[in-house]
Image (cartoon, rainbow, N blue to C red):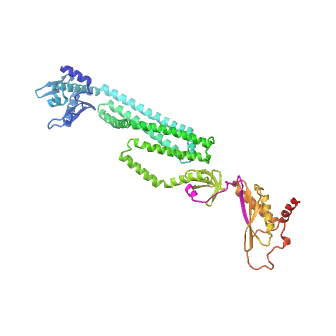
Amino acid sequence: MAITILLLLSLLAPATSPALAADAPGTATAPVVVDGVTLFRVRGLSAYPADERASVIADRVRAAAADRGAAIDTLRVVPGERSSDIVMGDDPIMSVFEADAEVEGFHRDDLARWYARRIRGAVEAYRRDRSPRNLLAAAGASLAATVVLAGAVLVLIRFWRRLNLILESRYTRRLRSLEIQSVQVIHAERLREAVRTALRVVRALVILGLAYLYLSFVLTRFPWTRPAAARLLGYVLAPLATMAGGVLTHLPNLVFLVILVLVTRYVLKIVALVFTSLERGTVTFAGFEREWAVPTYRIVRIAIIGFAAVIAYPYIPGSESAAFKGMSIFFGVLFSLGASSVVANMMAGYSLIYRRTFKVGDRVKINDVVGDVVAMRLQVTHLRTIKNEDVIIPNSVILTSQVVNYSTYAAREGLILHTTVGIGYEVPWRQVEAMLLLAASRTPDLQAVPSPFVLQTSLGDFAVNYELNAYCGDSHGMAARYTALHRNIQDVFNEYGVQIMTPAYESDPASPKVVPPDQWYQEPARSLEESPRKAAR
């Protein structure tokens, strides 16, 4: 019967062995460990704690194994009246008492024989691992592992360099495209640096993993370092076991999150398809402009993702913990304090788009800055002046400023270019207006229809202020057309001997500064007056 029990114990150990079973309720036990291997667990006795007893037994096993003069066959169980003693030669190893047997639920001698068998295996392994042949083999294996590790690290470094070159050559253009599509919220150089940093982190993790495997392999080759290898393995397995347990616990929530992500992804694809059709004009809505498609899609996408995040929050592992809630509040406050101007500029940017204040390519004047709109970002708007300067204006500033758009009516109705000259009262006004209209007709790129016209804006103390108005169809050449118009005005006035100057008062003239009636139609006013008469005849 005893032999049958021992055979069953040997077959089922260590899963159901009495020595390796869990501690009985209220009973303190300690493991007997030799070379990093737990042989069995022992309970404490009166005035003999379990830890101290296990340490003494482990020391005796190591001492017996180190004594090459003690034959392994001398290891035996000596039954006694109060205990069953395990000895090797003449040296005692341990004693098994009735209390030990009662805790495990086995006969004392059977339990002692099982302990002896475990000790015998430990002694044999102790001597075998420390034999010159095994130590030499372990050293050779460690050397080979070192060579393999060095080669793997070199190959990994070369592979990562090649991977960086591939990323630089193939994905730089894609990153630049992503920067443009994101309206420069994502900068290509920063994104490229983030990818490089991620690759460096992955490379470091791979090297650390290889180093861990190398240390585990080398440390397990030698009996003196095997406990350190076991501890090293525990450092990795314990967190993994905790993580695996957490994953299994939250598996239903994780499945829900995966389904939610998939549904959200396909909803975003459908929404993107609709707004792409709106942008191309294949789908139209009354009152919805095509240029609104992209910004509206961004707003809808943020709303969908935010709605999905609100739904997903209770199912995120750890979301109910105080630490998670504290971090959420911290980042929320940080965002609200630090991103107020960013959010204001973004909202202003969207407001400018929907109000159709201007678009890319328009010639505008914002405050005192005149230039062409070259880019409209979520945060800022870029203007290029006629001096080829890049002026960056925050959208929130534009929203509260006066904006003059020269291009809105230029193509359809024409932009009116106007300039003012002051001429003394002694010059007939008909002559002045005729000269100004003649100068406008000589200026290229000014429209004949609608025809130019002259306004007398004020009758000053010493001069009349004449304003010449002429239409042009392109707002981007304003500076060049003004220059040409001013040149022609000077030429025409010089041709007819009229000075462009505003007289100042110093004394009363000898004769009144008036124009006699016979001089009212001085050239070219006479020609302009006669032309309608001839046409009427």
- Up-down: is 502 above or below 205? below
- In the image, 97: left or right of 148? left
> Residue drawn at (50%, 42%), measured in percent from left and top?
195
- Does the magenta run of residues contain 414? yes
As drawn, which residue projects farthest toward the left?
81
- Up-down: is 463 above or below 157? below
Q: What is the span of residues highlighted in magenta in the rendered image?
A: 394-420
Compare residues 510 and 156 and report the one nearer the observer.
Answer: 510
> Residue drawn at (85%, 65%), measured in percent from left and top?
526
Compare residues 29 and 361 and report the one nearer the observer.
Answer: 361
- Image quarter where the N terminus lies is top left
- Image quarter where the C terminus lies is bottom right
Q: Position of residue 296 (x, y in %)?
A: 56, 47
Q: Position of residue 220 (x, y in %)?
A: 33, 31
Q: Is residue 10 visible?
A: yes
> Residue drawn at (50%, 39%), measured in percent from left and top?
265
Q: Position of residue 263 (x, y in %)?
A: 48, 38
As drawn, which residue projects farthest toward the right?
537
- In the image, 240: left or right of 413? left
